[in-house]
């Protein structure tokens, strides 16, 4: 599947297609009148979206939804697209489809839309962010997909999805954590607050294990990270000639240029005799980090 190139698209079509519980009048104004399903489709004629952003489905929540569906039916139609042979691919509503299977329903109300692959992914991501109880890592991954694949900025996402920019920025930072720490968030063993506190730690994986083992609160986790950082400051600093060993004048000049452009300290550590190395950016506050994220997302 390939995303469209060129000018970033707005979120308007995706959101209006998603909001199946509202409709538009001839002048484009949104009304509160419920939109009726286009048709009912046999459950066996529906298939899941292989690129569904949500990867985990809580069995307890599915059981609860299935019980509700069995008693009241599916109130909110699924959004689907035709794929040939009388079959349809689910764009939004896979949880309802799974619950309907568990409730042994024979057919499901759907709204049919002619979406291309790019629009399917976009609407599926938005549906998850807006309506499903995603964990923080899944939500962050959804934002990142919208930014990477469709060129949306944090500001545009915040405006279109009714979120604050700081909310989106804070969640995106979680994706910088090691995979094992992200898994702990997905499994509910630590909260997003715990994870945010670990972002600035030198060894977040080890500290995360301590947080889980000792059942630390978010505030206690913040104190643990601060204590570690304070301990690092108390250690003797490496001599400057060690840090600058082998660093030529061109590299130092490039560091100064990047520091001026990004308005933060930049250190380039190039491995002699190779084409690899590290670029280390040091921010002094979260506003600087927000600015950097905005620049990198454009």
Image (cartoon, helix red, strand yellow):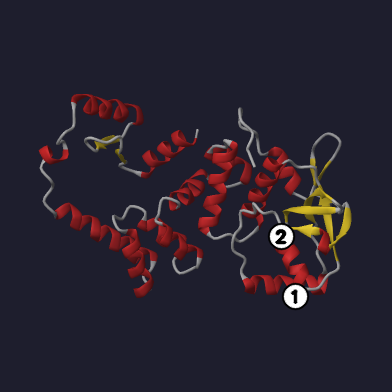
Q: Give neighbour class at mark 2: few <14, some 14-19, many 20+ (Cα, 10 Å).
A: many
Relative to 17, is 149 on the left or the right?
Answer: left
Q: Are marks 2 and 1 in contact (CB under 8 Å)?
A: no
Q: Residue 197's x, y, as percent? A: 37, 57
Which mark lies nearer to you, 2 or 1?
A: 2
**Element assignment for label 1:** helix
Q: In which quarter of the image is residue 150?
A: top right
- Callout 1: few (<14), some (14-19), or many (20+) C-alpha neighbours within 10 Å? some
Numbered mark located on residue 94 in the image: 2
The N terminus sits in image quarter = top right
Query: Is any part of residue 21 visible from this angle?
Result: no
Quadrant for residue 156, please give it: top right
Q: Which mark is residue 67?
A: 1
Query: Which mark sits nearer the N-terminus, 2 or 1?
Result: 1
Q: What is the x, y in percent for residue 117? A: 70, 43
Reply above or below: 145 against 192: above
Asked if residue 203 lies left or right of residue 103, the reply is left
Which mark is on residue 135?
A: none
Say which element carries label 2.
helix
Residue 107 vs 281, above or below: the answer is below
Residue sitting at x 51%, y 47%: 168
Residue 78 sits in quarter? bottom right
């Amino acid at each position: 599947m390939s995303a469209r190139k060129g000018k970033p698209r707005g979120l308007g079509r995706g959101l209006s297609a998603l909001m199946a519980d509202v409709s538009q009048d001839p002048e484009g104004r949104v009304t509160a009148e419920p939109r009726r399903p286009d048709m009912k489709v046999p459950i066996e004629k529906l298939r899941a979206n292989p690129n569904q952003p949500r990867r985990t489905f809580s069995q307890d929540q599915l059981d609860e939804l299935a019980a509700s569906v069995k008693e009241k039916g599916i109130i909110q139609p699924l959004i689907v697209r035709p794929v040939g042979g009388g079959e349809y691919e689910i764009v939004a509503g896979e949880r309802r489809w799974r619950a309907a299977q568990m409730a042994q329903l024979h057919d499901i109300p759907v709204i049919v839309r002619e979406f291309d692959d790019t629009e399917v992914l976009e609407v599926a991501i938005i549906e998850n962010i807006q309506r499903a109880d995603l964990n923080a890592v899944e939500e962050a991954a959804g934002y990142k997909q919208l930014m990477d694949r469709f060129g949306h900025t944090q500001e545009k996402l915040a405006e279109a999805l009714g979120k604050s920019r700081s909310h989106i920025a804070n969640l995106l930072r979680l994706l910088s954590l090691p995979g094992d720490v992200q898994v702990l968030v997905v499994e509910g063993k630590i909260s997003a607050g715990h994870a945010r506190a670990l972002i600035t730690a030198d060894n977040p994986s080890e500290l995360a294990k301590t947080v889980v083992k000792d059942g630390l609160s978010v505030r206690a986790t913040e104190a643990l990270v601060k204590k570690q950082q304070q301990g690092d400051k108390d250690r003797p600093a490496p001599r400057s000639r060690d840090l600058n060993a082998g660093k030529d004048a061109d590299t130092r000049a490039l560091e100064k240029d990047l520091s001026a452009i990004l308005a933060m300290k930049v250190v380039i550590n190039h491995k002699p005799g190779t084409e690899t190395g590290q670029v280390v950016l040091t921010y002094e506050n979260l506003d600087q980090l927000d600015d950097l994220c905005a620049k990198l997302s454009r």
